[in-house]
Amino acid sequence: MLRISGLSKRYDDDAGLQHVALDRIDLAVSEHEAVALVGTSGCGKTTLLRIVSGLEPATDGQLTLQGDAVTGPRRDVGVVFQEPRLMPWLTVRENVRLALLDLAPAAQDAVIADLLRDVGLTDFVEALPRQLSGGMAQRVALARALARKPSVLLLDEPFSALDSFTRMKLQDHLGALWERSRFTLILVTHDVDEAITLSDRIVVMRGQPGRIYREIAVNLPRPRGRTAPEFQKMKDEVTLALDIS
Amino acid sequence: MQWRGLVLPALLLVAWQALCASKVFTPDVMPSPVAVATELFRLWTKGQLLGDIVITVERVALGFLLGTAVATVFGALVGYSRRTGEYLDPTLQALKAVPSLAWVPLFILWFGIFEVSKIALIAVGVFFPIYLNLVAGIRSTDRKLVEVARVNALGRFDLVKRILVPAALPNYFTGLRAGLALGWMFVIAAELMGASKGLGFLMLDGQMTGRPATIVAALILFAVAGKVSDALLVATGRRVLAWQDDFGSVQAKTGP
């Protein structure tokens, strides 16, 4: 459903020097697949995700989603950023509503109630973002991204700012939502455990310029116990590919 | 605590009275607080004072509303659309460089010596801080929040209403306060230039008739009116900006 071929991204810095952030990326993601893009910082994985989301244009190459060239943000693509990016002046309810403004108001309220129940925040509908913990705020962001029942959900290191306990909880939560709704999931992360827990396939990127170095299929049964020996073996393999050990 | 703000004025009042009582200040130069209070009472019972206060407040209010309305429209247009800004902003910046009082001869020629020219002058003074702060507020909206609007396909109206306007509100209120302060400044200028009523006229009258107590009384009334109107703005701002999570709002609850 998502097809990337020969995609490059170059930009000029303030000194007029040209940088190559992404170099001839080829990637295909099928419907309902969960793909993790992993790599050390600066390898271009966030840039790639931003291009897929339509927020940034590519310099060269093709990018199609369900056959259509991506020229800008699309209603059927949900995005969760590294930070929750909630409007500090809006309550939880109104923040989620931002994704639903094309619906009739009554329908908006019904969808919001469902979404917040899904992410376990029913009691915080009227709360302001400053009253939420980091994990709660990111769950609101997740609810907002899922509001329109997207066919693709893009996540850019969504849990990297959270403590490890909250992170694991949210990973399991996201995994359950994915199993239930079966949207296509593309997750950018530098957390190998997270990539193995959530994805069917791990795409290892290396910089600079950013290229795809290896693709590793994750053929472990779900839900994946993080302490299983196969999990550890996989982790060693990905770590080796990342060249960080 | 609110009462702390009254400590310094109370001390000054006591010192002022003491200096007058000990003849350091002579009554023809600086009347004592008691003399000023007596003068205020005299003006009040004469029935003139209320009218003077009302007309001055009215001028400031009308000028402030007019200046705010125009500044809000221009500020929103220039802040939202860079292209509109390229057309409008250089001209407005050039007009800003004209000292506001320099408009007086022209306004008197255009609008006459009465109310309209005074209100126009106040509106000009009010305009610039509000315009500048609103533009700065909209432009400094976090890019990351605007991206949320983009990925959620917000329309232009919803982007302005739900994101740009609230994000600009803290700056906007700073501009409103600065604008209001200038409004009080310009009302005196307007009334000193020619008026038959108002607190500025009262001051001029005190000068002409050699009554320092009248001048000081009018000064005090200006201070009180300015402070009260500013406090009203601050209270409104606090309610509208209750979502803020900054040092100032934490300080308000817990100190120091």
Image: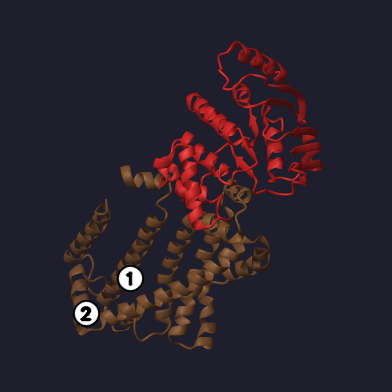
Quarter of the picture holding the N terminus of chain A = top right
Q: What residue is shown with label 1?
A: B222
Q: Nearer the viewer, residue A86 or B126?
A: A86
Colour brown maps to chain:
B
Residues indicated by labels 2 and 1 sit on the same polypeptide chain? yes
Relative height, residue B50 to residue A87 (above, below): below
Determine whether the residue tagged by mark 1 lies in a helix, strand or loop: helix
Q: Nearer the viewer, residue B170 or B36?
A: B170
Looking at the rendered structure, the kind of residue marked 1 is: Phe
- As drawn, the label of residue B44 is 2
Confirm whether residue B255 shows in the render: no
Q: CA distance from mark 2 to mark 1?
A: 15 Å
* Label 1 Cα crowd, 10 Å radius (few <14 / some 14-19 / many 20+): many
Q: Are marks 2 and 1 in contact (CB under 8 Å)?
A: no
Looking at the rendered structure, the kind of residue marked 2 is: Trp
> Chain A: what color?
red
Confirm whether residue B254 shows in the render: yes
Relative height, residue B31 to residue A130 (above, below): below
